[in-house]
Image (tube, rainbow, N blue to C red):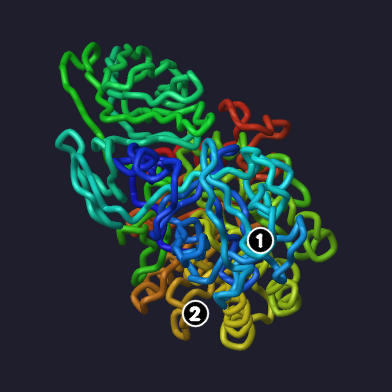
Amino acid sequence: MNPTTSPIGSRLAQWSLAVLAGLYAMASLAGPITSGEYMIKSVQSSKCIDVAGGHNGANFQQYNCWSGANNQRFLVTDLGNDAYSIQPRHTMMSLSAAGAGTVKGINLEQASWSGAAHQQWEVRSVSGGHEIRSHHATGLCMDVAGASMNDGANLLLWTCHGGNNQKWVFIRMDDGASTGGTATSEGQTTTVNGISFASKSTGGAGAEDSWNIWSDGYIEQSFALSNPSSLSVMARGEVAGGVWPTMTVSVGGTQVASFTVNSSEWKSYNLDVTGKTGSQAVRVAFTNDAIVNGEDRNLLVKSVSVTTSGDTGSDETTDTTTPTANALVAQNGQLRVSGVNLVNAAGQPIQLAGMSSHGLQWFAHLMNASSIKWLRDDWKANVVRAAMYTADGGYISNPSVKDKVIEIVDAAIQNDMYVIIDWHTLNDNDPNIYKAQAIEFFREMATRYGNRPNVIYEIANEPNGYANWNDHIRPYAVDVINAIRQIDPDNVVLVGTGTWSQDIHQAADNPLQDPNVMYTLHFYAGTHGQELRDRIDYARNKGAAIFVSEWGASQASGGGGAHANETSAWIHFLNQRAISWVNWSLSDKRESSAALAPGASTTGGWTNQQLSDSGRLVRELMRNR
């Protein structure tokens, strides 16, 4: 993982604000490539070349483009004699043909630079882009396996045939020029229409201080609306294949308009919004991004404004560029620990709040892309937790449950949310019992997701019984974290504590040395009260960062009803300290801690009748935090 997004907009909006509007005009012209730093985008899929990890042999693949991800940025160096080296920024290794192979089907990977011929590449200008040809194996080109359009599709050498899955657009990232506003680096600000906000911009001709939304991205911000309100979006489009960009506008999770942005000049697209009052999320999305015969379809948005009237009797216009309240990944980027706080890429404290699955061997059907999207949009969740039991029919005896974890993580990434990969120890008491399997599992997860800012690792859910911090949990954590850090140096790791993750004071007295570790506390409002809240303050006063990765409104047994007063006291306490929390659980099990009523929809859209008492309470607390 490397420094990624700036705290702006929403999913993939890190490309916005004068980042890309002129980059193709500047960098993807037919002709020779000069030495410099580039992102490299597939003409066929509009996805970027991506390195799946930080180790020798890490695979080259295609993945949705993320401008701040150094595993998608490459130093391209002209070596002379029509040869280039291509080195990923996050490791400065080199694009290599595996095993120096010379036949089609050879995998492409990163390896330490040796200067050998299998690490040298010809970048040849062709109609609509560039081919990347092997310099050591005649007639073979970089190819997206099977002409796949999917994230994670493998890159390999194949016979050069001129197809779009062998054509690439080079987007120069190190020019620094700007024709409007200020070229910036990470953490700085630029100005659009007098409004300042954090951005990442390499500038470029035609950037014009605007949001450049692409790869089916969107920007989003909450506004105070009256009934009615008028909404105006200033936008312009860039055509590809004779088709202009489509821009949709949604308010409060409901699409209210769709426009064809058929002008290359700035134009206001206006609509009236009725039936929506109070704070409402306004989203502007781009739904038909594509590259057609070398032309790149783009949607650029210069401003969003709302004029309120009607119910309030006032007339007020608000412009926005600040992050949404529920703090999604594109706004906040790479998380880390600073003192006792979880902070975003800009160093600002951030609070995550969301839902945990129940055991995926039992209730996997309720955690999916649609239900996760509903949690994000309706509940205002910004994190989900994939609870993969180790025992009780979980991973140890049923390794296929890992496939559901991968599905949930991919869905969270798709929905621009953070996601906790939970190694859910419980009835196995001591995490050391399956430590070897935990190391293997987290190595795999770090290899797959270590370059994604979305991911948080929870390496031991609830150690209990004889397992204590100093003798059992801490030594286990050292070994598992070391395995993760060999691949992923900086994603946050959550570590459980003794007595079902209540003994955070012991961890605070003998902490781990990794700077991006947080200690988990679990509570159930009908059982646990002020004593554990005092324990949190004790641990924080000792410098320990705390994350409540599981809590319930019920008793610890899962039953006993929803304890609304004690739950509210707990959430008020956590919110005051910006301590992140995840509720147990998104299930329709017949127990008080389940958020859903038996038989509730499996894809979200839950009515009050489909929520349990706990579900209604948690939704309200999450939306109003």
- Which quadrant: the C terminus? top left
Q: Amino acid at mark 2?
A: Ala
Work out whether residue 99 or residue 411 is closer to the camera in this orientation and state it. 99
Residue sitting at x 76%, y 56%: 105
Question: How many numbered circles does the render carry?
Answer: 2
Which numbered disc covers residue 301? none
Work out whether residue 152 or residue 623 is closer to the camera in this orientation and state it. 152
Above or below for 187 versus 499: above
Q: Which residue is mark 1?
A: 108
Q: Amino acid at mark 1?
A: Leu
Tag 2 secondary structure: helix
Tag 1 secondary structure: strand
Above or below for 562 versus 573: above
Residue sitting at x 42%, y 60%: 335
| Direction from residue 572 to residue 203 in the image, left or right | left
Upstream in sequence: badge 2 or badge 1: 1
Q: Which residue is mark 2?
A: 507
| Direction from residue 572 to residue 593 in the image, left or right | right
Q: Quadrant of residue 537?
A: bottom left
Work out whether residue 505 or residue 25 is closer to the camera in this orientation and state it. 25
Q: How many other residues sit within 10 Å of disc 1, few (<14), some (14-19) or many (≥20)? A: many
Residue 239 in the image, given as x and y percentages of width and height: 43, 23
Above or below for 523 versus 598: below
